Image: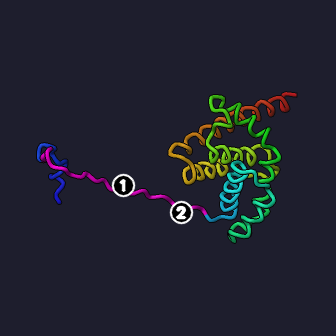
């Protein structure tokens, strides 16, 4: 069909007749990363979601998850560290999140978003292993795009961006104090 035929004038349609207007929407998404850390983050999110929405205990959820998903079994130590770290530091992590997103009470944030943010804050601020901050943020945003609601990725990105900016600022002040002393 020639491009000159578009747009179709509405005056060419008979308003007394029923007609259907259809739109075809094609969403192209990149495949999920298959690195060990990405697999571990996805599995950890699923486990944390279950723990946050049920009364199940962590040990049994972990074991069932490993038994049912062979790809997660290969990275079980990373998953245990992420899930265990979030569980152990949940109160501190939630306090940090509440500080940087005060207009969103943590118990009212969507379960998926809340647990993505918890994992990212744990990885960024509380774990001993160094993971580059851009990697943490990119993975968290990607998880929010895949598993969250329409605007989850923007919310996650905004909160993590604020935490990162503040952390850089605090680090710069600490370095100035050490260098100045």
Question: Does the residue at mark 2 contact the one at mark 1 (Cβ under 8 Å)?
Answer: no
Rendered location of residue 57, percent (x, y): 79, 55
Residue in the picture at 63% in, 52% down = 139
Residue that numbered label 2 is attached to: 31
Q: Is residue 82 visible?
A: no
Rendered location of residue 75, percent (x, y): 74, 65
Residue nearest the observer in this picture, 149 or 93: 149
Q: Is residue 158 left or right of residue 69?
A: left
- Are there few (<14), some (14-19), or many (20+) residues within 10 Å of tag 1? few
**Which color mode does the image show?**
rainbow
The quarter of the picture where the C terminus appears is top right
Q: Is residue 15 left or right of residue 37?
A: left
Q: Tell me where residue 178 sits by quadrant.
A: top right
In magenta, the rendered stretch is 13-33
- Judged by depth in the image, the label closer to the viewer, 2 or 1, is 1
**Secondary structure type for disc 2:** loop
**Secondary structure type for disc 1:** loop
Residue that numbered label 1 is attached to: 25
| Label 2 or label 1, whichever comes before in sequence order | 1
Does residue 94 sit above or below 145 in this rendering? Answer: above
Does residue 56 sit above or below 76 in this rendering? Answer: above
Residue in the picture at 66% in, 48% down = 116
Q: Is residue 19 left or right of residue 141?
A: left
Question: How many discs mark residues in the rendered view?
Answer: 2
Residue farthest along the right direction in this orientation: 181
Magenta stretch: dominant secondary structure: loop
Q: Tell me where residue 43 sits by quadrant.
A: bottom right
28 falls in the magenta region:
yes
């Amino acid at each position: 069909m020639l491009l000159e035929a578009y747009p179709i004038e509405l005056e060419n349609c008979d308003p007394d007749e029923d007609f259907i207007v259809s739109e075809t929407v094609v969403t192209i998404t990149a495949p999920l990363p298959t690195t060990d850390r990405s697999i571990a983050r996805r599995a950890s999110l699923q486990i944390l979601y279950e723990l946050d929405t049920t009364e199940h205990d962590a040990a049994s959820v972990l074991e069932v998850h490993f038994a049912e998903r062979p790809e997660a079994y290969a990275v079980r130590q990373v998953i245990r560290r992420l899930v265990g770290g979030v569980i152990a530091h949940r109160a501190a992590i939630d306090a940090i999140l509440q500080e940087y997103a005060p207009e969103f009470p943590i118990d009212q944030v969507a379960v998926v978003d809340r647990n993505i943010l918890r994992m990212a804050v744990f990885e960024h601020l509380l774990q001993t292993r160094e993971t580059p901050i851009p990697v943490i943020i990119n993975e968290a945003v990607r998880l929010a795009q895949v598993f969250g609601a329409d605007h989850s990725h923007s919310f996650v990105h905004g909160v993590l961006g604020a935490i990162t900016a503040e952390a850089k600022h605090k680090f710069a002040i600490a370095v100035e104090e050490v260098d100045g002393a």
